[in-house]
Image: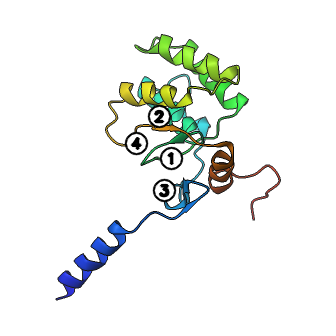
């Protein structure tokens, strides 16, 4: 009887529509913690760097699932460019092309960039389906990244 009740509860929660605000799935993004870029270094594997690049696109793209978030900042882009440039990764050229676009502030095809990275990683869940509106992007950043004027308490 307890098992049956638990299964019904699981089915109920899985069938519910996601809670959204301005088109952003808050359940999907609310618990994502900003991850530290410092965890990747010149000694990191290609997959580790691709993972960070993937997470950097999450503030822009529409996807059913997003795992993690790293804020897209000029500093992060520069650090990744240095790491990729110093290595002989199999997908180095593709990675540099994407990072150079981002460095120029070109995010017009960031969903395609995400999917290139996602395909290299053999992704099967979370393919980008488009780019969020500026309002949705701001909501994502507010939900997932520490704001400059906030202090740790």
Mark 1, other Cα within 10 Å: few <14 / some 14–19 / many ≥20:
some
Circle 4 residues within 10 Å: few <14, some 14–19, many ≥20: some
The answer to whether 94 is drawn above or below residue 20 in the figure is above
Front in this rendered view, residue 26 or 130 = 130
Say which residue appears at 48% left-offset and 31% top-offset: 114
Q: CA distance from mark 4 to mark 3?
A: 11 Å
Which of the 4 image quarters holds residue 76?
top right
Q: How many marks?
A: 4
| Residue, disc 2 | 51
Question: Do the numbered discs 2 and 1 sit on residues whose CB atoms are within 8 Å?
Answer: yes
Q: Are marks 4 and 3 in contact (CB under 8 Å)?
A: no
Label 2 or label 3, whichever lies nearer to me, is 3
Tell me how far mark 1 sits from mark 4, CA to CA: 12 Å
Q: In the rendered view, tell whether residue 81 sits above or below residue 6.
A: above
Tell me the mark number nearer the camera, choosing from 2 and 4. 4
Name above or below for residue 6 compared with residue 45.
Answer: below
User: In the rendered image, which residue does mark 3 sit on?
Assistant: 28
Quadrant, the C terminus: bottom right
| Of the image marks 2 and 1, the number of the one nearer the N terminus | 2
Which quarter of the image is occupied by the N terminus?
bottom left
Q: Nearer the viewer, residue 16 or 80?
A: 16
Residue 118 occupies which quadrant of the picture? top left
The residue at which mark 1 appears reads as: 68
CA gap between label 2 and label 4 equals 13 Å
């Amino acid at each position: 009887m307890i098992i049956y009740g638990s299964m019904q509860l699981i089915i109920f929660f899985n069938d519910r529509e996601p809670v959204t605000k301005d088109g952003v799935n808050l359940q999907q993004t609310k618990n994502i913690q900003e991850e530290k870029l410092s965890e990747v270094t010149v000694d990191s594997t290609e997959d580790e760097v691709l993972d960070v690049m993937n997470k950097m696109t999450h503030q822009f793209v529409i996807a059913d699932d997003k795992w993690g978030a790293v804020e897209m900042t000029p500093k992060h882009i520069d650090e990744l460019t240095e790491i990729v440039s110093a290595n002989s990764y199999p997908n180095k050229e593709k990675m540099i092309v994407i990072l150079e676009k981002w460095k120029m502030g070109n995010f017009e095809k960031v969903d395609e960039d995400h999917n290139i990275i996602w395909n290299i990683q053999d992704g099967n869940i979370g393919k980008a389906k488009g780019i969020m509106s500026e309002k949705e992007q701001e909501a994502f950043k507010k939900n997932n990244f520490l704001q400059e004027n906030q202090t740790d308490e």
